[in-house]
Image (cartoon, coloured by chain):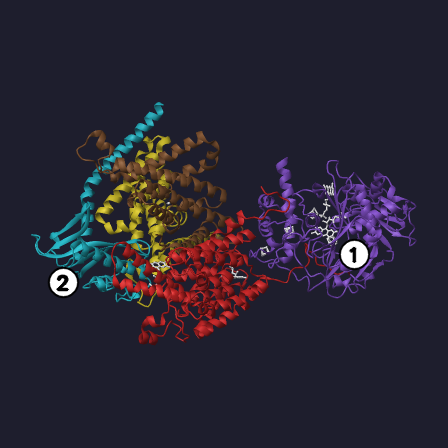
Amino acid sequence: MNLRKLTFKGGVHPPEFKEFAEKKSIEILPLPESVVIPVQQHIGAPAEPVVEVGDEVKVGDVVCEAKGFVSVPSHASVSGKVIKIEKRPHPVGGKVLSIVIESDGEDQKSSSITPNENYFDLDIEEMKKNISAAGLAGMGGAAFPSHVKLSPPADKKIDTFILNGAECEPYLTADHRLMLEHPKEIIEGVQLVMKILGCKNGYIAIEKNKPDAISLMKKSVQETGANLKVVGLNVKYPQGAEKQLIKAITNREIPAGGLPMDVACLVHNVGTALGIYEAVSTNKPLYERVVTVTGKGIKEQKNVLARIGTPFQNLIDFCGGLTENAVKIVNGGPMMGIAQFSLEVPVTKGTSGILALTEKETQARTPGPCISCCHCVDVCPMKLMPNDLAKFIEYERYDEAHKLGVLDCIECGSCSFICPSKIRHVHLFKYGKLEVSKMLKAQNS
Amino acid sequence: MKDILKLGGILLLVTAIAGAALSMVNAITKPRIEEQKRLVTQRALTTALPKANPEAIVPVTENESVSHYIGYQTTEKQNIAGYAFVAKGAGYSSIIETMVGVDTTGTVMGIKIMQQVETPGLGTKIEEVRYGESSSWFQDQFLNRIADGLIVDKDGGDIISVTGATISCRAVANSIKKGMGELEERLGGFKVN
Amino acid sequence: MEKNFLVSASPHITHKDTIPRIMYSVVISLIPAIAGSVYFFGVRAVWILLFAILSAVATEALIQFLMKKPITVKDGSAIVTGILLGFNVPAAVPWWIPVIGSAFAIAVGKIPFGGLGYNPMNPALLGRAFLLASWPTRMTIFKTEPTGGTLSGIDAAAINEYGLDSITSATPLNVFKTQKGIISDWNELVKSGLEDPILQEKAAQANNAITQLYDSSSNLLWGNVGGVIGETSAALLLIGAVYLIYKRYIGLRIPLSYMGTVALLSWIFGGTEGFFSGDPIFHILAGGLILGAFYMATDMVTSPVTSKGRYYFGIGCGIFTVLIRLVGGYPEGVSYSILLMNLAVPLLDRYTKPKTFGVKKK
Amino acid sequence: MSLSNEFSKGFYKENPVFKLALGLCPTLAVSNSVQNAIGMGAAATFVLLCSNVIISMIRKGVPKKIRIPIYIVVIATFVTIVDLVMAGFAPALHKSLGIFVPLIVVNCVILGRAEAYAGKNSVLYSFIDGLGMGIGFTFALAIIAVVRELLGDGKLWGIPMFGSGFEPVLLLILPPGAFLTLGMFLGLFNWLDTKRSAA
Amino acid sequence: MEFNELLIIAVSAIFINNFVLTRFLGICPYIGVSKNMDSAVGMGFAVIFVMTLASMVTWLINAFMLKPTTSNIFYIIFNAEAPPDLTYLKTIAFILVIASLVQFVEMVVQKVSPALYKSLGIFLPLITTNCAILGVALLNLDNDYNFIASIVHGLAAGVGFTLALVLMAGIREKLEMAPIPKALQGIPIAFLMAGLMSIAFLGFSGLKIQ
Ligand SMILES: Cc1cc2nc3c(=O)[nH]c(=O)nc-3n(C[C@H](O)[C@H](O)[C@H](O)COP(=O)(O)O)c2cc1C
Ligand SMILES: Cc1cc2nc3c(=O)[nH]c(=O)nc-3n(C[C@H](O)[C@H](O)[C@H](O)COP(=O)(O)O)c2cc1C
Ligand SMILES: Cc1cc2nc3c(=O)[nH]c(=O)nc-3n(C[C@H](O)[C@H](O)[C@H](O)COP(=O)(O)O)c2cc1C
Ligand SMILES: Cc1cc2nc3c(=O)[nH]c(=O)nc-3n(C[C@H](O)[C@H](O)[C@H](O)CO)c2cc1C
Ligand code: SF4
Ligand code: SF4
Ligand code: SF4
Ligand code: SF4
Ligand code: FES
């Protein structure tokens, strides 16, 4: 490695609060009475239900089928009976068609979950089929269908794969625990991905605030003899955002509006790599995931392995419940996560954490005037001018906002975090992006 | 084409009428304007050379421009009462022009600031006439001094400057001083008393 | 029944800095310099600062009350404006000078544009420029001795007893400028072929005075010189500045590029013996450069947000400062140069936008 | 519209400076003393009156295409007359108004009235309009000048108004004072308007 | 004329006696066209161009048609007894010349460079009745500038105007998005801003350039 610092320009240092859960081994959540499986847990077309009310299902049975290429199926995460197919609240917002399964408590696994012998020698297409059938959608937050990422167009050669173990969001420790508890499986997952893509360079990128994970990974890589480099990254949010990650490790810059494959890279999250390993080696679909239940508003912070579709309430109860002063529940981390109205919503493939924040931490922020302190400009990892963007969007000048690059914003929240005036940039940008897209559509037609 | 000619013709006609009207007005006002201009210099000269006969102040030219004036005591241009010249010095925001009269011994007899565009309320106070007085207190200080005494207080002299306008005052004093030096040279020296 | 959870857009945590926190930190950072001003100028300094602060706060509150807008004086920005305005007047001014100055700063320089964050120019400096243009004599009487004096200005007794001049002590830059003026007057005379013995004598003295000025850097550093209340002690101002830099409320780009430019240009053009004979240390320590560079050019509202823009801003301030100091109508150019560069901030921001990540440079 | 209405509209309702924002350069430049303001106002009123009358007299004979050049010639003629007469009979005023006397030619108020009013109305109405607008213009100049001269110089019409203790706000008679005072007046009139329409 | 003197004329017209901020010339376009940066820049260049050209042409008109010298063309053509003093016609002559000049420039630009016309064209007619142009011509006369000095003065006056205009446009674009009290929105705040700008430009007053 050269002497270049492994990082990117900008970024912030929010308080980490990883100590709540980083030492807690992953615990298995008792089976819930019922699960709610939304047909949309990924980016792309919603899946289509293939069961009907009253059907009996086993764990791992497909309950909704992918519709089109950029889409993934979902599977039953408990065995039991389909009792309802209706719209239910979704952690990403709004109500989404969901399949509600009442558990029979037996946890019978589907017969399709069978180990593949010599799975490493499977045909590449076969592997991709397994991954696609397992319903894998990126577990790093964006929930993009993994098989799509693994099938780049012929003209895009991928030479570098990066395993994203940055876990830069404060509080969250799910990836950290996975790396400590399943290092070998994760490394196998990485090797599978590299084999599928035929790429030579593999990196395991971990922020330096997880020294135990770095050393364990290094040891495991040595033991398995895998051709991988484990790199320690500077601790800085959003180090785990793929553009910034690729920049830090390879010094390549994904062009605006481009994808990792444009610079011959691919990034996957730790959880996704594990999922890929499981999908290829045992045909196990993605029906459970590790969720960090944490925050000052939780009595006992834990990392739990929960079935997809388990209501948040179950996880919180498992962790001793909420404290008196918990006022905000977030799906994900504090920087990018989504605040929830109720605890009815289910864990989805993208739920990396459930965060309960207390009153003190979330004091109502009344945005003040921008005092041009330039902090937001300094920290923006995309080198945008959030102060100007926010003003343009506030005054509905979408044309200028578009010219200033609002569509390049990755919504990392660094600007809002640092702003002394508590301006809600991300809120404005989410809205602004919609308006800009509308405007562009109108212009094109 | 015909249209353009016609329009041009009308415009020309209007302009011609205007021009004619103006030339008439000009004929009436021209003498007065010139008289006014002359009066400005004349008044300054009489202020600068109070002892000279106003009718007997004559310009001396050098290289086609007036270098200074000589004021005689009588209409017959006898007995030199003194000399006058225009001193120019860079003030705060303009070139300040002062008509200066000195007697034959090199003593200032009178000065009159003729042109300045200093800051209103600051530099313009070099022309201030205090309420109830009839002449400018600042300019009066120059009377009966010889060149060596023309130094403002800020530079260690005793000409009191207008507060906040040292620059303008210094310009007046220094330009007069310099002008007197040049005049002395031109005359080959003042008479010693 | 379930409780209602708060819902808002991400991020759900924010940095602990808030506007009041920043503003009050600035106030704290100014305490050493305030203490110094009391030491150098006596209790008068306290009164002047107090009047300036009260006037700024009261003006803001009153106007907002009359306009039926929320009253925002709690954010502390008016206090900072008040202190900095007070810092920008000489100690001998009567009480109404800081009162009117602060009122102008807030009522004309800040509120009409929408209040905190929207004012295009530095309010405190506008207040100072307004005072300087309106009452130039009041604003240029400096004294070095700590005195009580009366609130309406300098004691009448003192004026009678010593004459105005004895309590009027020129600032170092003032001395520098007049002396330089004498030397150049002398050179003029020589050029026109005249040699005036009096001026010759004075020119020699002037040369001497400038040399002495250059030798007095330690006085300049500690503040034992004439000047406006806040500018005299470079050292005390720097203590506060270090605190603000540590807190990241001010960056180094503006102060360093500003002072660097002044040092370079004054070294090249500032001397009496041709190019490269000026004394950069003198020019950095004398006058209000330290105050301006660390506290006023860095006012967030009125400086660029981009990092290149901040360098250009500092360099521009430096150029105008030296220009005004050396050939301008005033001995000091810091306030005007910052005001002038304030005007260019929108342009600087516009033309120094950072290159968006992933967008190729043309 | 009644004649008296035509006359009075120039004061407030259609005040050229405060409401129509016309003729701003001379307004700013010569409002540093009441004397200058009235002098300029009178000069402009004279030109406005004469050019309005002449233009409404010849309006029928003027071809549309070249009406602007012709108006300009007419206006320039009267401006020159004012200029010459002032130089001859009021040299001090002429000096302090400087180039703003010849610049009355491009004063938007005058061309504006010629184009908007005199070119379309009868001689009598044009005369009244010119008079009203001229006086309105003078009035605007004068009230700005009163503020600037009184506070900025401590005088009115050159006569000291305060005791010697008063230290005038010099800035007001300097260039910035012109902009600030006019800005404040414009704001004030806007505010009065909104209050009026609300009431 | 010495280079130094030309420099002084230029610096003075741009900074010390800025046409807009201290001489109060060209206020209408300064207020009217400064709402948006693109038009400010367009207008600025148009004014620089026309001012320079007008300085040149009016100087020639004055020197060879109005001034009572032996090079007066009426004197030469009509072989008059004494050269006529037509300087009293300067106002009317200059305004007509400037108006035709602008018209002419407009036509030429339209023919020669449609692209330039697109960006400058709309501003040209506005310029005719702009007192800054006539003002620069009259000031050249008042100051007795020679041909070169007049051109430099015209050019610098235009640059000074453009400087003030562009700075103002930058600021006003930002003010568009500020909670300015209702009564002050638009022209009043522009004047207040001009006043503050003018205060900053006081910093140049008294500048002594040698
Ligand atoms: C601001 C921001 C921060 C992110 N931080 C992380 C991170 O720390 N770890 C991670 O795995 N993915 C992170 N991501 C998501 C990655 O950009 C990327 O989508 C992911 O690593 C791709 O892997 P996946 O498809 O397996 O989810 C972040 C994204 C954004 C926009
Ligand atoms: C329309 C679309 C097509 C995509 N195609 C690919 C692809 O071909 N290869 C790939 O690696 N990722 C692809 N992605 C996924 C992105 O690279 C990225 O992982 C995803 O947007 C989430 O990243 P984030 O979590 O950093 O925001 C695609 C995303 C979208 C929206
Ligand atoms: C707006 C303004 C205009 C000024 N005009 C003048 C002026 O016309 N004449 C002058 O000598 N100084 C002028 N000055 C310069 C200052 O008053 C300068 O500080 C003063 O000359 C020095 O003070 P002193 O006269 O007490 O030595 C002006 C200053 C300002 C701010
Ligand atoms: C580092 C810093 C410097 C400041 N400097 C000034 C200043 O020079 N003048 C001023 O009026 N306010 C200053 N303020 C206060 C505040 O930003 C100012 O009142 C706003 O310009 C008003 O909108 C400063 C604030 C900070 C944080
Ligand atoms: S899921 Fe969130 S915390 Fe975890 S790595 Fe991704 S962005 Fe960071
Ligand atoms: S503008 Fe977007 S990318 Fe930049 S810091 Fe803000 S949220 Fe992050
Ligand atoms: S910027 Fe938008 S599309 Fe891109 S990762 Fe963030 S939320 Fe997803
Ligand atoms: S951080 Fe907030 S206050 Fe500072 S410039 Fe950005 S938006 Fe403005
Ligand atoms: S009056 Fe000067 S441009 Fe309109």
The x and y percentages for residue A349 are 79, 50
C-alpha span from label 1 to label 2: 106 Å
Counting from the top left corner in percent of width and height, residue A242 is at 71, 48
| Colour of chain E as rendered | brown
Q: In this view, does A39 lie above or below B8?
A: below
Q: Is residue A113 above or below residue B148?
A: above
| Residue A265, x across and y down, in percent | 73, 44
Residue A158 appears left or right of C263? right
Q: Mark 2 lies on which chain?
A: B
Q: Check the rendered structure and report the hue given to chain C.
A: red
Q: Which of D78 and A377 is in front in this view?
A: A377
* Quarter the C terminus of chain A occupies: top right
Residue A174 badge: 1
Q: Mark 2 points at which residue?
A: B192
In the rendered image, what is the letter of the chain coloured cyan? B
Q: Quadrant of residue B135?
A: bottom left
